[in-house]
Image (cartoon, rainbow, N blue to C red):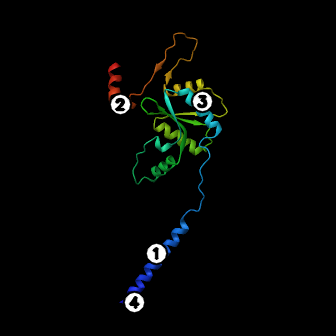
Amino acid sequence: MQLMAVTGILFLVSAWMLIRVSRKKTTASMKIQKRTVLLDSSQREFKKRLVDAVKGDFEVLPRVHLADLVSLKFKADDKASRLLQQKIAASSVDFVLLDALNGRIACVVQFDKEQDTEQANLLTTTCQQANLALLQFSKDTALDSAQIKKKVLSALEPTIQFDDDSETDAVKVYLEPVANKTEHERKIVLENS
């Protein structure tokens, strides 16, 4: 009886030591350091122009995770959806514009992002499916604040325009999706229709 107890104790101690040794081997031996800057100089300069272009109307947030901008619904046992969720969680966007009045996400802004094709397709597809405007600006195209503001507003307020600019009586029609409105706002839109 005592022999079995001693053998059992030795077995448990051996198992415990084996687990401790294996845990030490699986811990990563990497050095973690603080980054010196969040945005490089060209991104900081673009951010200044973007903030100047949309001041008062939108807040500009840099380096936002894509997963913070969308909500995903899928079955727990769906491996493809889980993989897509992991890819979205690992992705980030350069800037996000939030409506200054209500804090709603207005659009995603990418500035000269050197992405591989799969990453760019993931961002484009995710934004399209979430009905989220995506604006892309290039480092090679120097735009001032007024030009940036024009691009932002044209992306957020789609219009139907005639091709012939010589017509002085041109009509612009602003389209606003009713589905994205709150219940109270939908009633107002439908009553005024």
- Residue 58 location in percent, x, y? 49, 30
State the separation of the CA atoms marked 2 and 3. 32 Å
State the separation of the CA atoms marked 1 and 2. 58 Å
- Is residue 137 visible in the rendered structure shown here? no
* Quadrant showing the C terminus: top left
Which of the two discs, 4 and 2, labels the residue nearer the N terminus?
A: 4
186 or 28, which is in the foreground?
A: 28
Residue under circle 2?
182
- Residue 100 location in percent, x, y? 46, 30
Circle 3 residues within 10 Å: few <14, some 14–19, many ≥20: some
Q: Mark 3 and 4 residues: CB-CB less than 8 Å, in contact?
A: no
Circle 4 residues within 10 Å: few <14, some 14–19, many ≥20: few
Residue under circle 3?
49
Residue under circle 1?
16
Residue that lies at the very extreme toward the right in this rendered image: 140
Q: Is mark 4 on a helix, strand or loop?
A: helix
Q: Mark 1 and 2 residues: CB-CB less than 8 Å, in contact?
A: no
Q: Which amino acid does label 1 sit on?
A: Trp
Q: Mark 2 and 3 residues: CB-CB less than 8 Å, in contact?
A: no
